[in-house]
Image (cartoon, rainbow, N blue to C red):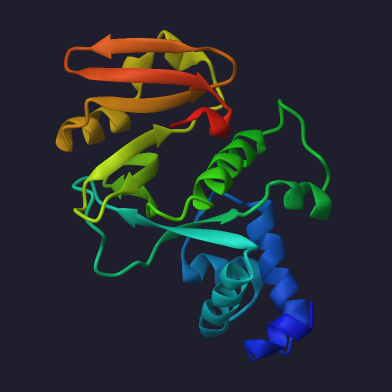
Amino acid sequence: MRDLPSLYGIKDVQELNSLFNVIAYNSGNEFNLESLSQESGVDKQTIRRYLEYLEAAFLIKILYPVGINTKRFQRDSRFKIYLTNPSMRCALFAPITFTDDHFGQMVETAIVAQWMHRGDVPLHFAAWAGGEVDLVMVAPSQKPLFVVEIKWSNQYVSNSGKLKSLLKYARENKKKVVWVTSIDKVRHKHMKILSFVIYPQHPIAFP
């Protein structure tokens, strides 16, 4: 709370806490510096330093977007922030249940937290006008190695055609297999040249 922040020149610990509370409550959401500044009351330049500290302290993981062609944007004005452990949200706020509106975000946070410890494949989310894919592992060749759409729902077991953004991204990048999470259903589905692997929300089960 004090010794480590001081290494980054952070003196106002209460201000840092204010920002971290906003991030923890909204883990998995997309942010930009403007929105973070408005919600936390911290100016944008200070937020940059706080985010650098929080990530170095292994409290958060920041994911930057790639486009539908899996290329990084020249300017990363938008990003997603995840807690490195979803339990931190429950420690700061009230525990949540399976039916809570935020539960899906915590499941997504848990999956990202599992993958970030691999360290050998950069994690991103894909975003373009009218579409988004939750998690993309990008090879040095700027090709997607692994594509995951994280859903806290079983509806896509029988309605995978509704995942229009995932389908579009897969076709654009010539991916033959994509993953979709479910609550507790397992299914392998084939749609022409594309295969869906639908699996329950257990991050350790992914290859």
Q: Name which quarter of the figure residue 6 lies in.
A: bottom right
**59 is higher (above) or lower (below) than 162:** below
**91 is higher (above) or lower (below) than 55:** above
Residue 157 in view of the camera: yes
Residue 165: x and y, percent? Answer: 30, 33
**27 is higher (above) or lower (below) than 175:** below
Of 60 and 140, nearer the camera is: 140
Residue 10 in view of the camera: no
Q: Residue at x 27, y 11 (%)?
A: 190
Q: Is residue 115 left or right of residue 77?
A: right
Q: Residue at x 23, y 49 (%)?
A: 70
Q: Is residue 58 left or right of residue 159?
A: right
Of 125 and 32, nearer the camera is: 125
Residue 24: x and y, percent? Answer: 68, 56
Q: Residue at x 55, y 81 (%)?
A: 49
Direction top: furthest residue: 158
Q: Residue at x 60, y 76 (%)?
A: 53
Of 35 and 96, nearer the camera is: 96
Q: Is residue 171 left or right of residue 28?
A: left
Q: How many marks?
A: 0
Of 64 and 59, nearer the camera is: 59
Give the position of the N terminus as an image quadrant: bottom right
Give the position of the C terminus as an image quadrant: top left
Residue 82: x and y, percent? Answer: 57, 53
Q: Name which quarter of the figure residue 12 lies in.
A: bottom right
Residue 156: x and y, percent? Answer: 44, 16
